[in-house]
Image (cartoon, rainbow, N blue to C red):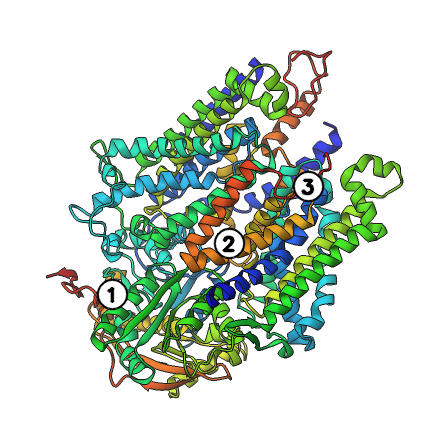
Amino acid sequence: MKRREFLGHAGAFGTVGLAGGLSVPALLSGAGRAYAAGDDIPVGLLFSLTGAVAVVEHTLHDAALMAIDEINAAGGVHGKQLRAIVEDPASDPATYSDRARRLMIRDKCVSVFGSYTSASRQAVLPVTEQRENLYWYPTLYEGRECSRNVMYGGAVPNQQQDILLPWLVENFGKRIYMIGNNYVYPKEENNYCRILLNELGGEVLHEEYVPLGHSDFSSVINRIRAQEPDVIFSTLVGDSDVAFARQYRAAELDPEKMPVCSLTRSEVEVKAIGGDAAAGHFSSAPYFMSNDTPENQRFVENYKSRYGADSVTHFVSEAAYFQVYQFKAALEKLDPANLSPTAIRDAAVGMSMMAPQGEILIDPNLHTHLWPKVGQWQSDGQAKVILQSEGRITPKPYAAYPGQDCTGDGLVKS
Amino acid sequence: MNTKLSYDIIGLTLFAGVILFGVPALFSYDGFELNTFSRYLSLAIVSMALALSWGTAGLLNLGQAATFGMGSYAMAMHLKLKASGDGLPDFMGWNNVETLPLIWGPFQSLTFTLLAGLLIPAAVGGLIAIFMFRARIAGVFVAIITLAFLVAFQLLVIEQQGLTGGQNGLTGLAQLVLFGWKIDIYSVSFYYMVGGCLVAALIFGLYLTHSKFGLVLRAIREDAERTRYFGYNVANYQTVIFCISAGLAGWAGMLYALVLEFASPTYMSVSFSLAIVIWCAVGGRESVLAAAVGAILVNLAEGRLSDVFVEGWHMILGVMFLVVVMFMPRGIYGLLVDAGRVLRRKPASTKEALPFDTPLNPKQES
Amino acid sequence: MDVVFNQAFAGLSIASILLIIALGLAIIYGTMGVINLAHGEFVMLGAYATWALQTYAGLGVVTALPLVFVAVAAVGWIIEKVIVQRLYTRPLDTILATWGIGIILQQAVRLGVGADSRFVSGPHWLSGNIEIGALVMSNYRLFVIAFSIMVLGATWLLMTRTEFGMKLRAVIQNRGISECYGIEAKNVYSVTFAYGAGLAGIAGALITPLFSTIPTMGTGLVVDAFLVVIVGGLGSLMGTAAAALLIGEVTALFSIVINDTLGRIAVLAGIILLIRFRPRGLFPSDIRH
């Protein structure tokens, strides 16, 4: 071991140590404070900016941040500005749990907006419920949850499928091929689909699950070609959906005879799939970017001017956006000296407001009444709305489980 | 040999003092900070477990996360059963499972869970070890086989949704009641429990490395063939250390599931397993104490960096890691050892321990 | 019966993709014993380079291939010279160092280009399918199969018929003596690493029209590529090809008989067993190392 080598090593150690040293001031944290006692109102943003889910979650982060900035520009709430504390949970549930604790306990956020995957939401649930904080979850999910500390902004299975299935069976046929990724969301959606198909006299040809992130669908396409379903009911997410759409097109299957109807495909996936491959297929969602209302036009214009002319809004980023406004509206009802998360939750129940998709309502069970639509993708990457629900659809997270109901008092079993 | 042992004992005492007294005082006994730090401590246990098999015996177990995950699922299964009262865990009902699977039944008992969390990972580690070491698989191939095993195991856990909760893992757990003590994971006593486990594990690890067993392992690491010629059953030694390392990883996993309040297949991902390797490398894989310190330091840095550099912290960690691997291959421990020698400026006396990679010269005794 | 033929073709397609990805890795590992965990990121770089060339220069996938090869090979060459070269005496440390490089490359792309999934359109003249009876074969996949065989052949020619190939084989056999003969082993290693990286880049370019292009696309590929290399046997091109074919067909078979997830588990179990009983792979080279 020569002195020169040692100095080289010490230099490396110094660089490493410097980075650690930069963090020393952050080691000492403040003692507990009351909620929003200071000059501003801290809110947490817990969307992944790195990792596998960042593809979608960064758009949720962008939409929520835009809403917060708009509110602040208009004067804030009760004269105070909203302070967004941004954390990056890196698509990892353990990191989600850690950062959520930081936001709720150390930073005393009055609410936290976050999560795309159910896994990350469930990782955050323990600390949210223990500390009686409020977690605003914008994403469609499988239902079967009834927490009193989560505001659910996304669709549950009955909202996605109640108007979709009858229409599919009527227009295309009764033979359904189910394909999804191998986790709880597709399984629950398929479960509910079977219940509806039973009533409609439909038939499930095949129910198939591929690993998350799986990309090679040659076997699936071979099977589809052999079985010739009337509709392909897809709950594939992310990369799998993109790969499947492209390979479907490369195999020259016909969307007019065997369309793919997806519950999860949004403008984000379509942009990656490409207009040609996406055209002719369907998605069921409460919101499409092409929605023709003044609120939506304003939302899309602001989003594009802020994040680029080729950026897209979709049904989850729209929810992330309107949830911030719901939060603001709830805050305004409260006494500024008493801004606790549970008070915000109670003020939010029963509130209706105009979102880019239409007028939405918060149910006592903390889910949202939405306007499901069925859209057909066009080659310009936008969806043309083919079917629109006549009224708002009530969220029933336990629709597939008779005997259980999610109410304003939590889960009630009869 | 004696000199090194006394250094290690001093180091361990200092470390225990800092962990058990210094840190809580620094954080003013704040529950949140201590809770975050206890997560680092449980990760330190798995890091030191890897140091036992990698640093001491030269076996790079890239599948350490699998045994870690087994431990965390064991604890989570127990807590899930407690949270479900008399009924089935909720996710089983949703997966159309009618009765409690046989494998879940015994986890009602706390004693069984605690033993299972240690012994099942050890047993699985032993099976893999027997599989590999009887065939005298060594070096890079150990890394690859353990990696393949990890990937397969994670896939299996995700696939068996009715048994394991699939991708979401086991969530909605009850609080642990440890022989009458209801554990609040934000309490100082919980922190002391985790800290105590870490110190106990370190004492055990130091005992192993300083014993004759450790000596033989180091011999195997240097030259397995030659050790075989001396009459030692190399495969047995490798298997035993692999088992011990796996059991310790399982123990760490149990604590981790307690701290985070859920168990997830992400605990068994390739990136997590490599992260364990990173912590061990940064601390210094030759010393179990250094590996534990490495885990704490890297996770602490990651926690603080992500606070400061929200967008770029991942990249900074990657760069730091690369710098460590290239210029500090023996980790911080290696740096300190070399610093010690430079500062002392004595010619290497026959009584001092030789550096890690000095080829043994027949003229010198050590 | 048609299902069997179609599945066999699917397996061939999977195999060809595995082959192109694994070939670069096999060359790097076979030559230098370097376990390059950043290989998946080289594939990702190739995919992004293709996207950039298509979006900003209007080049099609096939026209972009040589440029992508050169670009990613250049990155590989720099990485070898700056980092990997120092670690030849520490094989286990190359695993860690290349993992770190992989993280850095991934984050660099994410910070530079963004996390969005990028769209790359395949060449129009390759769209469509050839139908022989009930067997339907995608033109593009046929192209990829043909191309991978061509790349395999070109690599073999490079190794056996060129002067560089002769130097490379000499260095693989015995570095010390080759240097006594005046062969610059360092340069041979750098060029080889660059070539392996370039091949990975081409693989990335070829798979973009089929799969999606995101910064994290490499992580999943590197484990599969490694397993192909190990099963095939150290230092054997034929072995890598055979292993890719075997794994591709077995994966396709399992996924039609059971399901994709269990199929993958079964393949992994099979590989573990194979390594255990035949650690030197299917076609071990008969050079004593």
The residue nearer to you, when weighing A247 against A35, is A247
Residue closest to the eye, C158 or C34? C158
Q: Is residue B283 left or right of residue A346?
A: right
Q: Which residue is mark 3?
A: C33
Q: Is residue B114 left or right of residue C128?
A: left
SS at circle 2: helix
Taking the spot 66% from the left edge, 61% from the top edge, the residue there is C148
User: Percent position (x, y) of residue B25?
Assistant: 39, 35
Pointer 2 or 3: first along the chain: 3
Q: Which mark is residue B155?
A: none
The residue mark sitting in front, 2 or 1, is: 2
Q: Amino acid at mark 3?
A: Gly
Crowding around mark 3 (Cα neighbors within 10 Å: few <14, some 14 to 19, many 20+) is some
The correct choice, above or below, for B106 with respect to C224 in the image is above
Marks 2 and 3 on same chain:
yes
Mark 2, residue position: C250
Q: Nearer the viewer, residue A355 or C1?
A: C1
Residue B96 image position (x, y, % from top left): 24, 56
Q: What whole-number distance in Å separates the C-alpha atoms at marks 2 and 1?
A: 54 Å
The N terminus of chain A is located in which quarter? top right
Say which element carries label 1.
helix
Residue at (42% x, 64% y) in the render: A84
Left or right of A195, for residue A52: right
Within 10 Å of disc 2 (Cα), the crowding (few <14, some 14-19, many 20+) is some
Q: Is C43 rendered above or below residue B156?
A: below
Helix, strand or loop for disc 3: loop
Q: Is residue B265 left or right of residue A156?
A: right
Amino acid type shown at disc 2: Val
Give the labeled residue for mark 1. A345
Q: Chain of mark 2?
A: C
What residue type is disc 1 on?
Arg
